[in-house]
Structure formats: C-alpha cells, structure tokens
Image: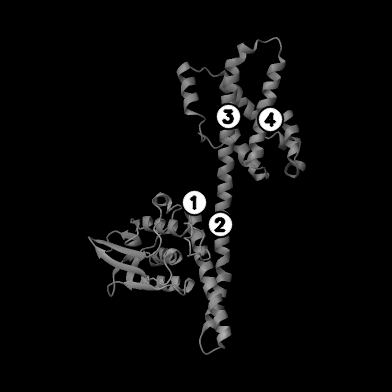
C-alpha cells in the first residue's frame, strides 16, 4: 500500500516498525470514509457540513482515527508526519480513482467531494487525539518536574540560610549564602508556578484548603518571600493589626508573593511598592501598587494569560526572574477562593492590582 511505502520515508521513527504497524488503522479509516460516502445526505445537510467545517472533536474517543492519532504520538511521529500520512492516503485513493478510465470523472464528483470531507474529518479527529496526548504528556512532565525539584531546592535554601547567618562565617561566605538563598527562593517560586499551571491544565484547578488565618500576617510572610528574590525592592505594608478569615493561607501567600514579585520586576527602582490589606462590604481586599511605566492598554486583556511577560522599559532592564506565570497563577488562586483580581494602570496612580475575596467568616 502506498501509505506504508510513504511512512517508511520518515526515517528513524519508522525504521523498526512492522508492516502492520505502518498500516495502523488504514483499513478502519477507509471503512469509515466508505460508509460516510454511502450514507444518504440531503442538500441541506451537505450545505451545513460545508459551512460548519470539520467537526473538531470526536463523538467517541475510540474511533479508529482517534486511536491512530494517539498511537502515532506514542510511536514518536510528529504532527506534521501524521498530517503527511493522510495526504499520502488521499493522493493514493484519488490516483486509483483516476485509473478507472471507463468511469466519467463527472459521475464521481459527488463521491470525491464526500471522500475529501470524510478524510478531513478523520484527519481532524486524529490530530485532536494526537494533540491531547501531547498536552497530557507535557503537563504531566511539568508536574513531575516540579515535584522532584522540591527536595534539592529545600536543601539549597537550608544551606543558603546557614551560610548567610551573621557571625558564623566571614562576610564573603555570608554573601555567597545570601546569593544561594535568593536563587533557591526564585527557583522555588518557579516550581510552585509550574505545579499550579500543571494542575489547571490537567483540569484539576487549584485546590484550596480553608482554615482560619490572618491576612495581615500572611502578607508579611509574602513580602519576606518577595524581598528574598528582590533584596533592593522597598515594600510597604498598610494594614490593620490583624484581619482574620477562612482562607487558604499558603495559596494566598503565593498570590501576594507573585504580585509583589511582578511589582518589583516592572516598578521603578527605588520607589516603594505599596501593599494594602483591608475589608469593605463584607469582602477582604489586597492591593499591590507600584510606580513605573504604564501597562499598554492592548496588553491588559491578556495580562492574566499563562506565559505572558511584559516588555522591559528603556532604562529599566533587569534579568527575568519568572516564567510569565505569576499573574496567571494569582488569578487562578483568587478564582479558587470565589474572588477576583483586577488591574488598573495610568501615569498618575501607577499600576495597581486589586484582589477581592468574599465573606471571610
């Protein structure tokens, strides 16, 4: 079969595959195509199909096309190679049709149209299944990576803390300890963001465990985390003595740390970053404000999307210290608490992120 011959041209990925493996699901896919062509279709149905395009998902994940897509992913095929297979299958069938010289091509025009539609449908199902498997593997990789990095990071942070203690070592060693600790804190934040991203992408969302906690105390801890990564940043906390509510303290600490890190990275050096904690209309709120360049209006709609980083402003170039996940994770944590997060940015007031959390008790 020409599909098998064509697949052999893919090099190492097919070098050890048997003839059966190379023809994987070809018969079933062609059976699906033949049945689709043989199924009566009204003019209205044909018009609707042509206008709606190819159905992007499967009614049944066990179709031959979907299974073929998943198995091609497992065999190491690229998505382009999967698409090329279908191109070869389409060309092979059309070539055989043309070789039937005793048949008027115009008599087959309707069948050829239905054939191309069915091939497109099968390809779409295979591509969707392939992509879903690819995304699942990627997200699982991120989750495993984040989990396995925690232990060595904890060891590095412990070593950095020990070396940085005043009086135990000379000043040069203490400075090395501080750098180790700052680096470990930064990487730990990245790991937390990767794990949170993996959970949301795998459909689990960010789970919260509500316990009575003090939002003011939590904010102080978050500022400490952000200061470890940005030792030159100036953080100012404006809050009452305490603000008790039922929240996931660790998650909210991650949220505030991410906002504080963002403010330190994009704010004007030497200008204070103001963090305000309070309560109004039965809602707790946390505001993080910094002075600096205004966020472009066109960037605001995508600001909380994953892997988004604002461009550095002229004269304010600093090393990247994040994966562009901080604001995305912050929003997911707010949503998990039943709350919201918004941002305003202008030349007068600077940039301010406002987190609102519902009834605290």
Marks 2/1: CA–CA distance: 10 Å
Q: Residues within 10 Å of mark 4 (few under 14, many from 20)?
A: some
Give the labeled residue for mark 3: 120
Q: Residue at x 63, y 37 (%)?
A: 68
Q: Are marks 2 and 1 in contact (CB under 8 Å)?
A: yes
Give the labeled residue for mark 4: 88
* Local SS, label 3: helix
Relative image position of residue 279 (x, y in whole percent): 26, 65
Q: Does residue 118 sit above or below 288 in this rendering? A: above
Q: Quadrant of the N terminus?
A: top right
Q: Which mark is residue 15?
A: none
Q: Residue at x 31, y 60 (%)?
A: 357
Which of the two marks, 4 or 2, is nearer to us in this view? 4
* Local SS, label 1: helix
**Frontmost residue, 271 versus 336:** 271
Quarter occupied by residue 290: bottom left
Residue 214 seen in the current view: no
Q: Would you say 221 lies left or right of 5 here?
A: left
Of labels 3 and 1, earlier in sequence is 3
Scheme of image coloration: one colour
* Local SS, label 2: helix
Relative image position of residue 17 (x, y in whole percent): 75, 41
């Amino acid at each position: 079969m020409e599909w098998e011959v064509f697949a052999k041209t893919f090099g190492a990925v097919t070098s050890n595959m048997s003839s059966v493996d190379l023809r994987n699901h070809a018969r079933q896919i062609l059976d699906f195509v033949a049945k689709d062509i043989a199924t009566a279709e009204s003019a209205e149905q044909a018009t609707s199909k042509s206008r709606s395009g190819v159905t992007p998902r499967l009614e049944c994940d066990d179709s031959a096309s979907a299974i073929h897509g998943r198995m091609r992913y497992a065999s190491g095929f690229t998505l382009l190679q999967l698409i090329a297979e279908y191109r070869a299958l389409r060309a092979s069938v059309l070539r055989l049709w043309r070789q039937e010289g005793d048949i008027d091509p115009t008599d087959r025009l309707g069948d050829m149209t239905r054939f191309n539609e069915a091939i497109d449908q099968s390809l779409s199902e295979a591509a969707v299944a392939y992509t879903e498997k690819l995304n699942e593997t990627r997200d699982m990789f991120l989750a495993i990576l984040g989990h396995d990095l925690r232990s060595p990071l904890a060891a590095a942070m412990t070593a950095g803390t020990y070396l940085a203690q005043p009086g135990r070592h000379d000043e040069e060693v203490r400075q090395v300890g501080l750098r180790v600790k700052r680096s470990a804190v930064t990487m730990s934040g990245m790991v937390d963001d990767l794990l949170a991203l993996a959970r949301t992408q795998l459909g689990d969302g960010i789970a919260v465990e509500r316990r009575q906690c003090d939002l003011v105390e939590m904010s102080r801890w978050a500022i400490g985390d952000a200061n470890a990564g940005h030792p030159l940043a100036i953080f100012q906390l404006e809050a009452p003595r305490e603000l008790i509510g039922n929240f996931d303290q660790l998650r909210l600490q991650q949220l505030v740390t991410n906002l504080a890190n963002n403010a330190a990275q994009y704010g004007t050096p030497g200008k204070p970053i103001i963090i305000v904690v309070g309560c109004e209309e039965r809602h707790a709120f946390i505001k993080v404000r910094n002075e600096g360049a205004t966020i472009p209006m066109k960037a605001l709609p995508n600001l909380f999307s994953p892997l988004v980083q604002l461009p550095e402003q002229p004269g304010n170039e600093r090393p990247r210290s994040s994966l562009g996940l901080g604001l995305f994770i912050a929003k997911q944590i707010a949503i998990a608490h039943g709350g919201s997060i918004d941002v305003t940015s202008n030349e007068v007031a600077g940039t301010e992120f406002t987190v609102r959390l519902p009834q605290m008790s």
